Amino acid sequence: MAVFDTTEPQTAGAGADRAWWERIPAAWWALLALLVVLPAFANDFVLFQVMGWTFILGMIALSLMFLAGYGGMVSLIQMSVAALAGYMVAIFGTSGMAELSMGLPWWVYIPVAIVIAAIFGTIVGALAVRTEGIYTIMITLAIASAFFYFTRQNYAIFNGYSGFNLVVPPQLFGVDWRQPVPFYYLTGAMALVCYLAVIYVSRAPFGLVLQGIRDNPRRMAALGYNVTAHRIAAYTFASVIAALGGILLVWQNAQIAPGTAGIPAVIDILVIAVIGGIGRPIGPFIGALIYVLLRTFSPDVLTAIGFEGERFKLLVGLGFLALVFWSPDGVLGMWDRWRAGRARAGDPLTGKGGQ
C-alpha cells in the first residue's frame, strides 16, 4: 500500500491512475476526521495549548524537514525566520507598544511579515548553500545567535529585552480567533495547508530536482540544473512556511520577545524534526506532539516524584540521544521497522505472510 507522505514520488503501476484521494490510506482519513471532531470532547487547554502549540511547532519544524529531508541542508535559522515574522506582525500591526507599532490593517501587515521573513531566509540561504555539512549548521547557528542578540539589544525597532505584548489576531467574520476552538481550527488548517504544500512541491519538478541535488549535486549540475538557485529557492519556500508558523506563534502567546528566537528554541526545532522523522513531512508534527506533551506534563510528574520540574529538558535530551542511536530516522523509522518485522513474521494484523 502506498504511503501518502513518503519522500519518493508515486510510480506508475497498479493504482497510479486512481484519483489522488483514492490513494490516501484510510488511516489518514480517520485521523483527519478525529482532528475535525476533537473540539467536541477535548477541553480548551488541550485545544489551545497542546494541539495549537503542536501545529505551530510542527509547521516550523516542517520547514526544517523540507530543507534537510529533500535538500540535504540542515538549517538552524528556521526559528529565527519565524520570530522575525512574529516581530513584523507586532511592528506593522497593533500591540501593547503603541508607540512602536504602526497599526496597519491585517491584509497589509500579514503579507508584509511573510515577505520580509522570506527575504531574510533567502539571504541566509544564499550564504549557507555555498557550504556543506557541519559548515551549513554552524553558519545558520551563528546567524540565529546574532539575530537573537540583535533583537535583545535593539530598542528602537524591536523594543529590546521586553519585546511586544498584546499581539492578537484580527477578529475576522466576527470571530475571536484567539479563543481555543477557533484558534485550534486556524492552526490546524494552516498546518494542513503547509503539509499539503510540501507534499505537492516534493513531487513537482522542482522538488524532484531538489532531491536529485541532495543525492548527487555534480550529476544534476552536469544535466544543466542550477544547483545553487534550486537550493536558495528551497530556503525561500521553507521560510514562507516558517513565517506562517511564527505569525501563529505570536498570536498564541500574545507576545514576542528575543527569547522566542533564543538558541534553546532554535535547537528545539531541530530536536522536534529529528524525533518525528526528518525524512517525511508528517514527522515534524509527530515530533512536535511528543515535545509538547513532555514540555507540558513532565514537569508536574517530575515534581510529584521529588525532582525539579525543569529536569524535563534532561528527559528530552536523553530521549533524543536514544532515538538518534537506535533510530536515526526518528519515530517513523521505528514504526516502519516494527511493521516490516511483523510482516516478515507473518503477523495477521499486517495482512501479509512471512517472507
Image (tube, rainbow, N blue to C red):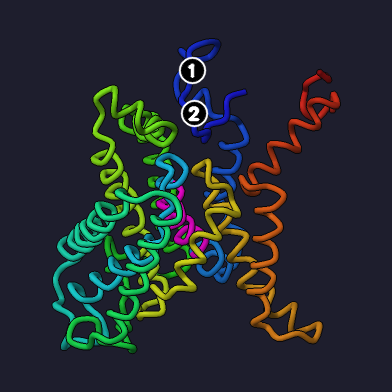
Looking at the image, which is closer to me, 217 or 289?
217
Question: For the point 18% across and 65% down, which residue is it?
Answer: 109
Is residue 147 shown above or below 160? above
Mark 1 to mark 2: distance in Å?
9 Å
Is residue 195 shown above or below 121? above
Q: Is any atom of residue 55 visible in this view?
A: yes
Question: For the point 56% across and 36% down, which residue is it?
Answer: 29
Describe residue 339's horizontal placement relative to residue 65 as left or right: right
* Magenta-drawn stretch, dominant element (helix, strand or loop): helix
Question: For the point 53% across and 69% down, which residue is it?
Answer: 49
Magenta span contains residue 281: no
Q: Is any atom of residue 187 visible in this view?
A: no
Looking at the image, which is closer to me, 105 or 276?
276
- Magenta stretch bounds: 53-65
| Residue carrying label 2 | 8
On residue 11, the disc is 1
SS type, badge 2: loop
Question: For the point 22% across and 63% down, which residue is it?
Answer: 113
On residue 209, the disc is none
Q: Verify CB contact (< 8 Å) between mark 1 and mark 2.
A: yes
Is residue 164 shown above or below 66? below
